[in-house]
Amino acid sequence: MLFQLAMFPTDTGASVSADVAKVINIIDKSGLPYKLSAMSTIIEGEWEPVMKVINKARLMLRRNHSRIYIVMTIDDRKGAKKRLTGKIESIEKRLGREVDK
């Protein structure tokens, strides 16, 4: 499964990078495969372990903030493996070249 996630507090002003860095630290330390982008993070894994990490990050932010904004999209494809890189490789194969990652 792929989980696309954006999570940040809404009560800190314009910049949320310090809090987002704390969320990414939790994801990174989980050992789950993930990719960080400018707008979201994609995590690959099964429901229970990924949701446990997401909830840990949520609870961490709730300690110091009254409101947390979370957007999550899930792609649950039966039997699919290594989708974090496989989806990109599939597009590159169809294009016949590498794309910017």
Image (cartoon, rainbow, N blue to C red):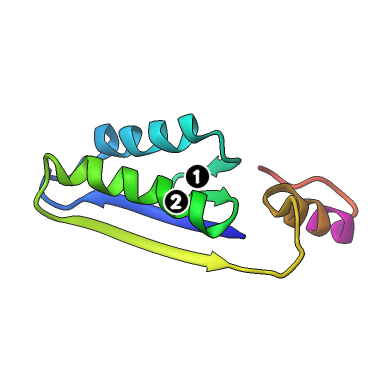
Residue located beneath label 1 in the image:
37
Name the residue located 74 percent from the left edge and 50 percent from the top edge: 82
The image shows residue 57 at horizontal and vertical percentages of: 32, 43
CA separation in Å, label 1 and label 2: 5 Å
Place of residue 24 in the rendered image (x, y in percent of width and height, measured from the top left): 41, 36
Judge left or right: residue 66 versus residue 39: left
Count of marks, rendered view: 2
Q: Amino acid at mark 2?
A: Ser
In the rendered image, which quarter is residue 75 located in?
bottom right
Residue sitting at x 75%, y 61%: 80
How crowded pointer 2 is (Cα within 10 Å; few <14, some 14-19, many 20+) is rated as: some
The residue range painted magenta reads: 91-95
Q: Quadrant of residue 101?
A: top right
- Which residue is at a point 90% across and 53% down the rendered structure image? 96
Tell which of 50 and 94 is nearer to you.
50
**Magenta stretch: dominant SS?**
helix
- Between 2 and 89, the residue placed more toward the observer is 2
If the image is split into quadrants, where does the N terminus sit? bottom right
Which mark is on residue 20?
Answer: none
Decide: marks 1, 2 in contact (CB < 8 A)?
yes
Tell me what residue is drawn at x 17 percent, y 47 percent. 62
Q: Is residue 8 above or below residue 77?
A: above
Under mark 1, the amino acid is Ser
Identify the residue under disc 2. Answer: 40
Which is more toward the observer, 23 or 100? 23
Other residues around mark 1 within 10 Å, as few (<14) / some (14–19) / many (≥20): few
Q: Secondary structure at mark 2?
A: loop
Looking at the picture, how far across and down is residue 26, in whole percent?
39, 35
| In the image, residue 97 above or below residue 23 | below
Left or right: 38, with 60 as reference point? right
Residue 80 as seen in the image, left or right of residue 10: right
